[in-house]
Image (cartoon, coloured by chain):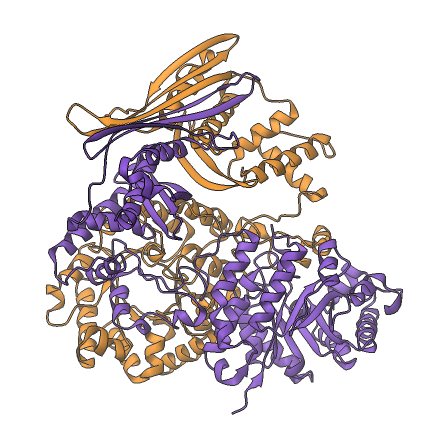
Chain colours: A purple, B orange
Amino acid sequence: MTKERLYLYDTTLRDGQQTQGVQFSTAEKTQIAEALDALGVDYIEGGWPGANPTDSGFFDEAPRTRATMTAFGMTKRAGRSAANDEVLAAVMNAGTAAVCLVGKSHDYHVTHALGIELEENLDNIRASIRHIKDQGREALFDAEHFFDGYKDNPEYALAACRAAYDEGARWVVLCDTNGGTLPEEVGRIVAAVVAAGIPGSHLGIHTHNDTENAVACSLAAVDAGARQIQGTLNGLGERCGNANLTTLIPTLLLKQPYADQFDIGVSREGLAGLTKLSRMLDEILNRVPMKQAAYVGASAFAHKAGLHASAILKDPSTYEHIDPALVGNARIIPMSNQAGQSNLRKRLSEAGLSVEKGDPALARILDRIKTREAEGYSYDTAQASFEILAREELGQLPTFFEVKRYKVTVERRKNKYDKMVSLSEAVVVVKVDGEKLLSVSESMDETGSDRGPVNALAKALIKDLGRYSKALDDMRLVDFKVRITQGGTEAVTRVIIDSEDGKGRRWSTVGVSPNIIDASFEALLDAIRWKLLRDDA
Amino acid sequence: MTKERLYLYDTTLRDGQQTQGVQFSTAEKTQIAEALDALGVDYIEGGWPGANPTDSGFFDEAPRTRATMTAFGMTKRAGRSAANDEVLAAVMNAGTAAVCLVGKSHDYHVTHALGIELEENLDNIRASIRHIKDQGREALFDAEHFFDGYKDNPEYALAACRAAYDEGARWVVLCDTNGGTLPEEVGRIVAAVVAAGIPGSHLGIHTHNDTENAVACSLAAVDAGARQIQGTLNGLGERCGNANLTTLIPTLLLKQPYADQFDIGVSREGLAGLTKLSRMLDEILNRVPMKQAAYVGASAFAHKAGLHASAILKDPSTYEHIDPALVGNARIIPMSNQAGQSNLRKRLSEAGLSVEKGDPALARILDRIKTREAEGYSYDTAQASFEILAREELGQLPTFFEVKRYKVTVERRKNKYDKMVSLSEAVVVVKVDGEKLLSVSESMDETGSDRGPVNALAKALIKDLGRYSKALDDMRLVDFKVRITQGGTEAVTRVIIDSEDGKGRRWSTVGVSPNIIDASFEALLDAIRWKLLRDDA
């Protein structure tokens, strides 16, 4: 059976750039465009040439792509010809194969925002599309505020679309600019547009997530006949974001009726790279990836409930709507106070600890975790601390060393230039193989900045652990998370430390105490013990 | 016209607790239950009594609510009577007015996960619902995997629902447990259930966000007749989360056809508190609020594009689907323009500072906030620190006192009973009215517990501030939040301290430094200054 073609139009580099706090550089735009092309989208909207130096710079050196590179702009202004509108000229001069122009389709915006006659706006749309076609380019028309406009004045909203279509626009894109239209309404209105004579094969849909329905609205438009979807990676975009292509792509490829009905140009290989692509974009933007993101989030296939987790072990399809590997993601079965023994055995075996079913140590470990969680500990992410705890119960944790005491001093005073400066110092006393070792460190780094008391404590502890010090040479702390939580009836501090070593390992440990320094020290001790378990041959 | 009643069933405290990394304490559960009740939801699912100490503890002292408090559990197991199932007994013993039991409705899960006969499962459902009804409670049945089950074996899925309904279940809740069903399919299947004889007034919908369609699926179910929606605040929940009530509530109250058709028990006042409630939950969980969240996100009404921003100034409805004030949110227009200054004046007047339009101090304050935010500060919640900063720029901040230096010691060693104990000590040197004052405190509280270095530092600072000490007598720290954030190119620690006084005031201050003690000290200083501004007559 031949599948129908459904087109993906990516606007990460244009509408995605409207996200609060997002500002791409030209180099970043190029990198993202190349990744989008590898993914297999059909159109890449690169920006608005002439609107700002970054967008202009991108088009000056736009990468060669299989996808149709598209410049964005607006329909010509009133009172001048298309050829004489310098804003439109800048867009045309980018020389892209396709040009997408936004124009008004809501009568209120024509008369109030533009302040021109309704008919004049239709003329502007016609002249602009004709101008693009005359230059041999593919023309797209973004009908701004289309759905709100249709609800107020359907004849005019349709007339604006028809003006573009009749002049030869390849696509008329119906935009829910303010994001307030619900899916049922989108479907109904798109069907009305098709019924009014613009074929679905020339209709695009552009939605925003202001009611959390951007994906559903896009699907409703496709159900009603539209054959182009506009969206962004990770749902970037102004306000609540645009329709999320990172969600739509797997839905279209893996879910019915779409999977059987459409070909979307993204291959199975492209799909398998989706999680990586999503994280790459977050990395470029220095954003924390959204754990709960559909398909690609770190939690998207994380199972916490004991009942679910044990069923997952038997048959993953019982609690997973797709195989996470299809989108390049992975299953996570974390520990929690609701975890069952089968869940626990699985996690132990991931740590290389094989424990027989029914071993009484399993119940002891679960009890200990429950008690600890009631005290404020959390083992969801702190897999290394979980392993240390389990090994203790199993009698498989060497002593390594004993901490006799430590002392940390934090001081803030004026320096000789009358400037307030702070400095921390840590002294640690440990016993290794019967020998008492004292070491001291301060918190100043190479640049002369104070890195704080936990840093000083970590340095002092690692500095002299006798025969273990060598194994710790390549270990460093890469992240440190703190939260105040409830431990029994009191507020306590929970610290999670992420460590890394030269062998590319990364592990997380947890410590809890009313005293933040002490909580950090506990997490640090677990981190060191875990490293010694792995490296101390 | 009389509106139809649509019921909201909140499961933040049960399914929301399945979110990776979320672990509520009993006190937090109580706080959230009270907030949900004030919001106006109809049911509060408090947890699974007997499954873990936190849930059991919550029901032991559950708050009295107008909403129907509901205990969650599972249908009785095979091979014993409902009365003799101790898991079910623990649920019943919580003594709630309503009990919701999850049971299988997908034949594959009955035969493969439970390993029992299909008919036996139906018997278990019937007996369990009857048991709840016999005890005079309201019964709810969560039909697990209902949509996947219906697609595989519609007769059996319906039979499971009918078993519960026929025994008197007030609600049969159709669950899309794995979150993979799309809105069109949900609508079609719910309509089929109604057609099969279970009235919509007894049907609930429970969806997950694995395809970003949880909200749309809930609406599709309501369109098809279901009259109860289950969801969570901020869309908490396992994997990608549950249907987000924070989005559904404003959609149902403000959008058609729902606004005219339904009464949902949440008032306009409740709606106006939604943004605050959403942030409160994030604060309890120490999660970074999602800026792009629909309705309540900090970016939900942020306008970046020049064209949009200038149109917004003329008429907000041009680029906003609702008035942000309806949900207690606010419009954000880039700080640099006129609108930024009018926002600032509004916030200053909230702090009792009246500044004329066009005063050059406004631009200076905006600049300073921008610089500080780039360093890692955040003034969203730290209104008291914002006021201190503004007063400094306006020349309206008295010096009060000067800190010359401080020193904090954290020590951990064995006590005379050979037990490891920790203790902190803080020395603070200040100058008040030309006089140098030294004070010292330790971190031990009345019960002999170490409360940590920040506590010791706060006590020492407040203890001797000369003529100011009296005004600080009734001040205490009630919360302390720590986050590692980006300050320029380095990771820094941001501390937010909430303080309270005997006059019922509560205020928040912020401090930032690579050194956590120093960041805390800065927030503490602001807290004391703010209190003195109010009380030092």
B486 vs B235: above or below: above
Q: Nearer the viewer, residue A413 or B300?
A: A413
Residue at (29, 77) in percent of width and height: B106
User: Where is residue A235 shown, x and y percent of the image?
Assistant: 55, 62
Q: Is residue A267 visible?
A: yes
Quarter location, residue A93: bottom right
Q: Nearer the viewer, residue A323 or A126?
A: A323
Q: Is residue A360 left or right of residue B339?
A: left
Q: Nearer the viewer, residue A271 or B71?
A: A271
Give x and y (percent) for residue A107.
74, 67
Q: Is residue B76 above or below residue B420?
A: below
Residue B515 image position (x, y, % from top left): 45, 32
Q: Is residue B511 visible?
A: no
- Left or right of A358? Residue A166 is right
Measuring from the top left, give residue A361's x and y in whole percent.
Answer: 14, 54
Query: For the image shown, how many numbered marks are present on the structure?
Result: 0
Image: B202 above or below B362: below
> Which residue is situated farthest in the bottom direction here?
A1
Name the residue at 31% across, 84% down: B153
In the image, what residue occupies the spot 73% across and 58% down?
Answer: A57
Q: Nearer the viewer, residue A479 or B312?
A: A479
